[in-house]
């Protein structure tokens, strides 16, 4: 596979369009099989730029990013995939999990609400709805505690200033 990479890259540089898409696909596979992940990602970006409506290329990118636990690039390719197929349940599930991992619970909740419409009794969807509602509740509770602490600190500070201020 590794020996094929320079030849496939040379074909892409040639500008010939006849086999361009299949060469991109083969180059991506060769990079992945040769453990050249960064080159595979760069090639996937180029391929998705050249074929922005090709879902197979986006799907390959998503799978490669999942295999390498690369959430930054995964987010980018999931976004491109959702632009092509906004109701794709696999992409929605991935997007929801990325939002959860990034502590964006309200966005994750929106995703799982959308999935619940399609699958109202799906245990996994209901579980994620519960998790995100709980996490939003925890965030709200913690924000309330911080606000309370700020208010108490402010009142204490004002009282201190009144006590220590010189009388005029």
Image (cartoon, helix red, strand yellow):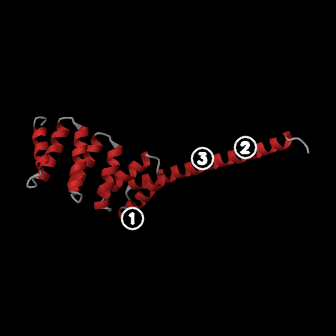
Residue count near mark 3 (Cα–Cα under 10 Å), binned few <14, some 14–19, many ≥20: few
**Residue 148 x %, y %:** 68, 48
Secondary structure category for the residue under label 3: helix
The percent coordinates of residue 166 (x first, y second) are 88, 41
Image position, residue 80 (x, y; %):
30, 56
Task: Identify the element where label 1 is drawn.
Answer: helix
The quarter in which the N terminus is drawn is top left
Direction from residue 1 to residue 93 in the image, left or right: right
Task: Identify which residue is drawn at 24% across, 38% down.
Answer: 37
User: Which type of secondary structure does the marked residue at label 2 adopt?
Assistant: helix
Judging by the rendered image, the residue that carries numbered circle 3 is 142
Which comes sooner in the sequence, label 1 or label 2?
Answer: 1
Q: Are marks 3 and 1 in contact (CB under 8 Å)?
A: no
Q: Pick whichever of labels 3 and 1 is earlier in the sequence.
A: 1
Q: Nearer the viewer, residue 72 or 101?
A: 72
- Residue wearing tag 2: 153
Q: Earlier in the sequence, mark 3 or mark 2?
A: 3
Distance from the alpha carbon under mark 1 to that under mark 2: 46 Å
Mark 1 residue crowding within 10 angstroms, few (<14) / some (14–19) / many (20+): few
Looking at this view, is 75 or 106 the one in front? 75
The residue that disc 1 covers is 117
Which sits in the foreground, 88 or 27?
A: 27
Frontmost of labels 3 and 1 is: 3
Tell me the residue at 44%/46% (across/down).
102
Query: Could you tell whether 101 is left or right of 85 in the image?
Result: right
Marker disc for residue 163: none
């Amino acid at each position: 596979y590794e020996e094929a990479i320079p030849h496939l890259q040379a074909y892409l540089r040639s500008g010939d369009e006849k086999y361009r898409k299949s060469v991109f696909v083969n180059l991506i596979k060769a990079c992945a099989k040769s453990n050249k992940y960064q080159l595979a990602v760069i090639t996937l970006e180029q391929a998705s730029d050249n074929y922005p409506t090709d879902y197979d290329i986006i799907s390959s990118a998503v799978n490669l990013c999942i295999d390498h636990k690369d959430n930054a690039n995964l987010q980018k390719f999931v976004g491109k995939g959702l632009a092509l197929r906004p109701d794709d349940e696999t992409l929605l599930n991935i997007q929801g999990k990325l939002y959860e991992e990034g502590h964006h619970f309200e966005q994750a909740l929106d995703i799982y609400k959308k999935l619940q419409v399609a699958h109202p009794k799906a245990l996994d969807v209901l579980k994620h709805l519960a998790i995100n509602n709980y996490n939003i509740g925890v965030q709200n509770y913690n924000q309330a505690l911080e606000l309370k602490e700020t208010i108490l600190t402010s009142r204490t500070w004002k009282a201190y200033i009144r006590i220590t201020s010189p009388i005029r």
